[in-house]
Amino acid sequence: MQIFFGMCIVLCLYVSGTRVDNDFRQTDKQMNVLFMQRQDHPAYGKHHGMSEREWWLDFHYRLFTAAGYHGSADSLVPMSVALIKHFAADSSTIRETLPHAVECLESFKRRGMILGLVSNCSDLMIPTLKQLELYSYFDFFEYSAGSGLEKPDPRMYKQALRAAGGVDPTDAGHVGDELIPDYFAPRTIGMKSFLFDPTRRYADDDLKDVDKGCVVNDLSELPQLIDVMKS
């Protein structure tokens, strides 16, 4: 089996010393703004002639407007630019790999498996992976800013299979932390999938249609789980 990873599976982000966990990202009401931004301008504006910088400026304006800001978009530009610089790959913002991520990747590489990263990420993904010395573990990268597609679009997974050398979907699996884009979407084209839930944020009702044997709470469990599924 060849394995594709979502970006959030290999690293976490710290802002001002506080870890930004999946629970925070998903429960915060600003996620609604991000959802609308991706609906209106998917793949970081790639299809609408927007630069990635313009996409982020527009997102910041929407975000602050939703929080009660009543000023102009132009007035927010200096702060937006500062935010963009703050999260740049070469900034002082702390990023680190998740526990057991490197061991997991090394285990798969030793077995000669093809590893890919399939993510709804911006162009920031590549320099960030290089900064964390994770880039060399992956054989290919399929990400929104580059491909113009976003999960859960099954075409993104089909492109990943082609990038992996024409791998049959039944011989490929994806692991990610989101139910629809990471777990259910790959299965629509015949791939296997695994849900990464380190904080156990999903309730039993959320997982009623999920194979509990494919839920991973720690990345150290993943290699053995895949061995079992291959046998």
Image (cartoon, rainbow, N blue to C red):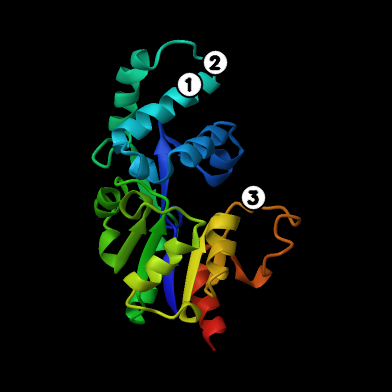
Counting other residues with Cα less than 10 Å from the Cα at mark 2, is it few (<14), some (14-19), or many (20 or more)?
few
How far apart marks 3 and 2 lie (CA) works out to 29 Å
Q: Residue at x 38, y 51 (%)?
A: 144
- Report whether 168 appears left or right of 28: left
For residue 103, what is the image quadrant? bottom left
Q: Residue at x 36, y 70 (%)?
A: 115
For residue 149, what is the image quadrant? bottom left
Disc assigned to residue 64: 1
Counting other residues with Cα less than 10 Å from the Cα at mark 3, is it few (<14), some (14-19), or many (20 or more)?
few
Q: Nearer the viewer, mark 3 or mark 2?
A: 2
Disc assigned to residue 68: 2
Counting residues from the start of the chain, the first of labels 1 and 3 encountered is 1
- At mark 2, the secondary structure is loop
- At mark 1, the secondary structure is helix
Q: Which residue is mark 3?
A: 201
Q: Residue at x 51, y 71 (%)?
A: 222
